[in-house]
Image (cartoon, grey):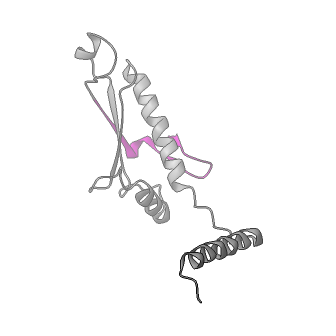
Amino acid sequence: MIIINSTLSIPESEISFSTSRSSGPGGQHVNTASTKVTLIFNVDDSATLSPNQKYRIKSVLSGRINLSGELRLSAEEHRSQYRNRQEVVERFRKMITEAVKPPKKRKKTRIPHGSKLRRLDSKKKKAEKKKNRSRPDY
């Protein structure tokens, strides 16, 4: 069970892991052991996510989800498969936490009076400068 926040936790049965040969550190060990770990999570088929959460995840992580609705994350930084698995699960947890977090509502603010005055003052100066470039009236 991967705990995302106090209200959401994703069972490991919905997540699949695959391993392959890594290109990271490890010397000759890298050529023989499958230390790269890929996490695959199908957002569409998840039973624990609500439709609203699925929509939020799909919109926020749209660049990371493929056409079949799978979110794929890989880790190959460490020499051991176990540490790479921990790394990819932690990244998945952080990513989903940020995605399901509701966006902040925008507070309407007014333009400060000083800003308005500075803008109008600069407009007057530009107008005066351009007026001085014209031919004088005789």
The image quadrant where one finds the C terminus is: bottom right
Q: Is residue 2 magenta?
A: yes
Q: Which residue is at the far bottom?
A: 138
**x%, y% of residue 127?**
60, 77
How many numbered marks have been drawn onto this rendered protein structure?
Answer: 0
Residue range in magenta is 1-19
35 left or right of 51? Answer: left
| Residue 58 x/y as whole percent | 40, 58
Q: Is residue 14 above or below residue 31?
A: below
Who is closer to the viewer here, 131 or 1?
A: 131
Q: Residue at x 41, y 29 (%)?
A: 85
Camera-nearest residue between 15 and 106: 106
Residue 20 inside the magenta-drawn segment = no
Residue 110 shows in the view: no
Question: Which percent across, then down, holds residue 55?
Answer: 44, 63
Q: Residue furthest left?
A: 31
* Coordinates of residue 80 in the picture (x, y in percent): 38, 19
What residue is drawn where x is 45% and y is 30%? 87
Residue most extreme to the front: 138
Q: Is residue 45 above or below residue 3?
A: below
Visible residue check, residue 8 = yes
Residue lying at 29% horizontally and 11% vertically, measured from the top left: 27
Give the residue at x 40% y 43%: 13
Decide: is 110 above or below 29.
below
